[in-house]
Image (cartoon, rainbow, N blue to C red):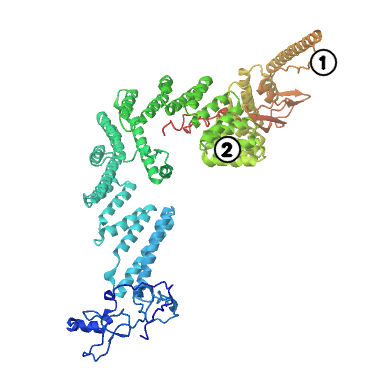
Amino acid sequence: MENVHLVPEEEEDDLYTGYNDYNPTFDSEDLHNDAAFQQAVRTSHGRRPPMTAKYPGTAIGGRPIGTAYGSRIPVGTAMGRPMTGAVQDGAARPMTAVRAAGYSSAIARGSVFDPLGQAKGPAPPLETKNEDTPEEKIKILEKKVNDLIEESCLAHAREDLQLSLEKAKEAGRKERALVRQREQTGTADHINLDLTYSVLFNLANQYANNDMYTEALNTYQVIVKNKMFNNAGRLKVNMANIYFKQKNYTKAIKFYRMALDQISNAHNAMRIKIMQNIGVVFIHMGQYSDAITSFEYIMSESPNIKTGFNLILSYYAIGDRERMKKAFQKLICVPLGIDDDDKYIPPNDDPHANMVIEAIKNDKLHQMERDRKALAEKYIMTSAKLIAPAIESSFAAGFDWCVDMVKGSQYVELANDLEINKAITYLRQRDFKQAVETLKMFEKKDSRVKSAAATNLSFLYFLEKDFDQADRYAELAMSADRYNPAALVNKGNTVFAKEDYEKAAEFYKEALRNDSSCTEALYNLGLTYKRLGRLEEALDCFLKLHAILRNSAQVMYQLANLYEMLEDPHQAIEWLMQLTSVTPTDAQVLAKLGDLYDNEGDKSQAFQYYYESYRYFPSNISVIEWLGAYYIDTQFCEKAIQYFERATLIQPTQVKWQLMVASCYRRSGNYQKALETYKDIHRKFPENVECLRFLVRLCTDMGLKEVQDYATKLKKVEKMKEIREQRVRSGRDSSARGRREGSAGSGSSSSPINTPPLRASVSRSEAKYSPVLEQGRDSGQSNHGTSAKGERLSVKLKTLPGSNEPYEASTQQEIDASYVDPLGPQMQRPKTAARKRNEEDEFADEELGDDLLPE
């Protein structure tokens, strides 16, 4: 018993006391170490009669049986099993049933409790792999190939096509090196075919993405011709797609059909997609009957929205009315496979259910459902608008049939949109009365449709300048849907037309609060600030708009105009240069650039842009005037003649252009041509003093007999002019005297009213170009004309010399060339709620709402 650990009796608080209180007969844990038990199993010792408690005198020599605890105790069972748990002479029993807790009879008192063996220290480090072995090198190389394929795919997802192709090529090189290495090590039978397939397939895809179609087809051919690759025949679909992109439709059909033959009926979805591609190729080839065959098969087996739409297009191409109707009915019956939106409405006040619904309301699945439904509605609307004029005698009857069909389908809400499109079609046909009547039918419909119809009615009345009706329907649209930005913009436009700019700005701001992407509201707000003189705020609006509409010509022009008003010509020129990159043939923009450069003193650049403007629009008087003045200023009078002759054709009743032509002939030394021109001018304008003066001068110098006749006529005309001026002057004096006498007689004012004297109204041409003879020299009067917007270009021009000057001499006079904004007064008109952009229309025209006008 010296090796047995006994529990002392005085330790009454031992935690493990009583754990071994069970029948020791069932202690079979160490039976394989019990020699007596093993001997009994091998012999008949275990079948002998039970022994007494005393030591028997048997063959074992009176020696007690040795148990697993090393003690010699008697066997206390009938089968001869040793009593390992027996108590001898009142001694404490050994702890034999707690081995699972980490105790053992061999452990001495005071030992540390360590059932997990942690006292032995950390485990030895793992053996490092030997990377020099061929197998390890092959594994490392395979991993590198897989990593390169993954990097190539990720680069393509980032739209970095060049990098994706480079990674795919590098993966191909390493995969070939891997195959060679396996062949050298004699493990060619273990070549990873899946890896080879992945490398080639990714490489072909990247070639196709980079438009390297020949290389892609060659790579696909390598895969298809290798019989070791399973299901490689499916890649003929990809090859057919490449042929379709190359517009090689015959080969595309061939490869689609080859792929169709190699795909079993078990993959029905794939077969349907290939059949759809075949139908699309037939449409491109103009073989509508073959396309119809493919689409009809798909609609009978697995109908879908795209195929139904293509089938309608095919029937429309061959002009089959009845089959168009049947195809439309099939289209609106195609199941979308999406749930109702009712499941996203909270059923009760359960907060947990509400949280779940909020979580799934905008998840990816719901977004996909919305996109699918929107696509279906788009195809149905487009189909209805396409076939409506073709299926009945009139488009109105066709629309009515489509509306009736849609009302009986799952797309019942599209019926109202079709009615609104019917009104828009009336507008395109210039039948405004029918359009208004159609839209007025919606006044008693639900709020959404009523708001849309009222918005369009407001737009129509705004175009007709019936601002009261436009305002009424804008109010109706706002009352139906206060958050409709189109209605708010139209309301702001009606207020803008009444010149209440502060109130208009409030409506535009509210529209922007409801929809921050409403570009019409932002544009009109900028125009409103411009009218109010708040140029910095207007500039901020148009800069924000430019960030949204990067290539909008009208936005760029407004920015240039604002910088010019802020006296920053360099920024104005910069924005106009950007504008010319968008609309390079806009003559007014080029003329404006010439004007800005001329104001900056850069005549060469100004001439370049004015000349380009003249090339695109040779009827702009201001540009013609500037170019003629430029050539006279640079002493090239012969070149100026063509511009003034064109001005004469444009304004034949203006004498100034014909005088300038004659002056140019005279300056260039062609006196005979100048004389003929002056005579022609005298026949058309016999009372023109300047023409008669130069006729007298030329005839005198050339010794012609007509000089006396022209001199007589000149005296008569000058006398008539002097009498006319005296009459005007006397009338002005008498009227001024009468006003003074009336003011003095009334006595109502302590001081007389200073009225500016009336001046004789003279034509602008006389004020600019008619020189006046004074002390032997002519001094021209210049009346600086301005355009509608107060913008003016002044250039120095040598005008006609006096009669006493030699022909070569001339004095510097200032001639005004007016400039009108490239966009005209329409540019300041506010845009309506939604504009359909049209290059041929004026820049800021009004159009229907975005939510109403189909693309």
Q: Amino acid at mark 1?
A: Ser
Which residue of the protein is positioned furthest toward the top in this rendering?
Answer: 745
Q: Is residue 533 left or right of residue 300?
A: right
Circle 2: element type: helix
Report x, y in % for residue 579: 55, 39
- Depth check: give the residue in front, 433 or 365: 365
Report x, y in % for residue 762: 68, 19
Residue 407 appears in the figure: yes
- Depth check: give the residue in front, 144 or 442: 442
Which residue of the protein is positioned furthest toward the right in this rendering?
Answer: 750
Q: Measuring 42% from the left and 24% from the top, which residue is drawn there?
A: 427
Q: Is residue 398 left or right of residue 649?
A: left
Circle 1: element type: loop
User: How busy is the neighbourhood of tag 1: few (under 14 within 10 Å), some, or many (20 plus)?
Assistant: few
- What's the CA distance linking mark 2 and mark 1? 51 Å
- Depth check: give the residue in front, 545 or 17: 17
Q: Is residue 116 left or right of residue 533?
A: left
User: Residue 675 — which label?
Assistant: none
Q: Is residue 260 above or below residue 729?
A: below
Q: Measuring 28% from the left and 71% from the top, which residue is drawn there?
A: 188
Q: Measuring 34% from the left and 61% from the top, which residue is drawn there?
A: 199
Q: Amino acid at mark 2?
A: Phe
**Quarter placement of the C terminus:** top left
Q: Quadrant of residue 618?
A: top right
Q: Which residue is mark 1?
A: 751
Q: Is residue 709 above or below residue 544?
A: above
